[in-house]
Amino acid sequence: MYGLSTYAFFWRISDRSPRPLTLDEMLARTREMGGEVFQICDYPLIETYDDGRLDALRATAAGHGITLELGTRGVRTEHLAAYLRIARRLGVTLVRSMLNTADHRPSVAEATALLRDTVPAYAAAGVTLGLETYEQVSTEDLLAVVRGVDSPHLGVVLDPGNSVARLERPVDVVDATAPYVVNIHVKDFSFSRRDGWVGFTFAGCLLGEGLLDYDDMIRKVGPGERGINQIVEHWLPWQGGFEETALLEDRWTRHSINTLLRST
C-alpha cells in the first residue's frame, strides 16, 4: 500500500505555520489524495493522547479507510513499551524507530540487548518494529543489530537518501538492507552547486527528478510481493515564506503519491 507521513506535511505542522494541521486534517488529505496509509512519525504530541483521543483517532482513520503506522526515535525499553501501548490502541502493526536520540547513542551490543528484551512484546502483539537507515548509524551497524536480535518482527525502514551524508551510496544501502526491509520511505534527493560553485547543497526534489533509482529499489525489495508499505516523505527547503512553502509542499506531495499510484 501507498501513503503519506507527517513528514509530507512537515512545514504545515511546524511552528512556522499560522495554524498547524491536525492529525484529523492530515488523514482527510491523505484519503483525498488516494493514500491508504498514514504514518504518524516523530510526532511527540501523540504521546499525550489519552485512550479516548487515541480511540477517536483510530475511528477517524478507519472511516477514511486508512491504515495507521507510528514512528518514533530510540530503543530504550520504557519508551518502546509506551509506543507499543499506543500502537495497540490505534490498531497499528508497524512502528518505525531510530537507534539514537539526543541523549542516548547505544553501541551495537547495547542496542541489540535492549531490543532482544523489547521485540518479543511487539511480536506477541503482532507489531513489527523497523529501524530506519540514516547517517548517524552505519548500515553495517544497523544490520548487525537486526541480525543480532534475529526476529521477523524487527527489520529495516529503508530510506536510502538519509545515508548519503555518511558517504554511503543509496544503491549500496538498498542492496544491503533489501532482505530485511519492512517499510519504505519514498523521497527523492539531489545535489546542487552553491553560489559561486563553493560546495553543494544536498536537498529534496520532485520524485523522479533526482538521484533515487526508485525502480531499482522496488525491484530489489519487492514491496508488493512482501506486503511492505511505501510512505511519502520530503526534504523540501524553506521557500522564504509560509504560503509559498505550503503550496509547494502540497504540490510535491500530490506529485509523489500520484507517481506511486500510477506505478501499480
Image: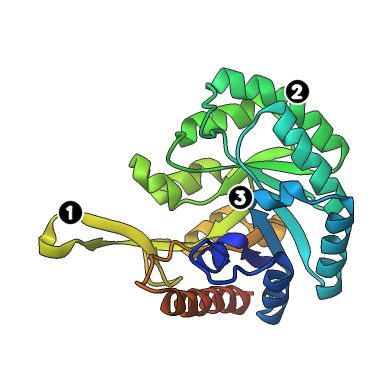
- The C terminus appears in which quarter of the rendering? bottom right
Residue at 49% of width from left, 48% of height from top?
A: 174
Residue 78's image quarter? top right
Classify 223 as above or below 3.
above
Category of crowding for the residue at label 1, using alpha-carbon neighbours closer than 10 angstroms: few (below 14), some (14–19), many (at least 20): few
Whether residue 225 sits left or right of residue 63 in the image: it is: left
Looking at the picture, which amino acid does disc 2 mark?
Asp
Label 3 packing within 10 angstroms: few (<14), some (14-19), many (20+): some
In the image, residue 231 lies at what x, y percent?
Answer: 61, 61
The three-letter amino acid code for the residue at tag 3 is Asp
Q: Position of residue 218 (x, y in %)?
A: 56, 60
Local packing at callout 2 (Cα closer than 10 Å; few below 14, some 14-19, many 20+) is few
Q: Residue at x 36, y 72 (%)?
A: 239
Pointer 2 residue: 117
Quarter of the image that includes the N terminus: bottom right
Left or right: where 124 falls relative to 142: right
Q: What SS does tag 2 mark?
A: helix
Residue 94 lies left or right of residue 258; in this view the side is right
Q: Are marks 2 and 1 in contact (CB under 8 Å)?
A: no
As drawn, the residue found furthest toward the front would be 18
Q: Residue at x 52, y 61 (%)?
A: 15
Residue for badge 1: 199
Query: At numbered mark 3, what does the secondary structure look like: helix, strand or loop?
Result: loop
Q: Position of residue 19 (x, y in %)?
A: 59, 71
- CA distance separating discs 3 and 1: 30 Å
Query: Which numbered disc, 3 or 1, marks the residue that appears first in the sequence?
Result: 3
Residue at x-position 42% and y-position 79%: 244
Give the image quarter of residue 213.
Answer: bottom left
Query: Is disc 1 placed on a helix, strand or loop?
Result: loop
Which residue is disc 3 drawn over?
A: 42
Of residues 49 and 261, the one drawn nearer to the viewer in this rendering: 49
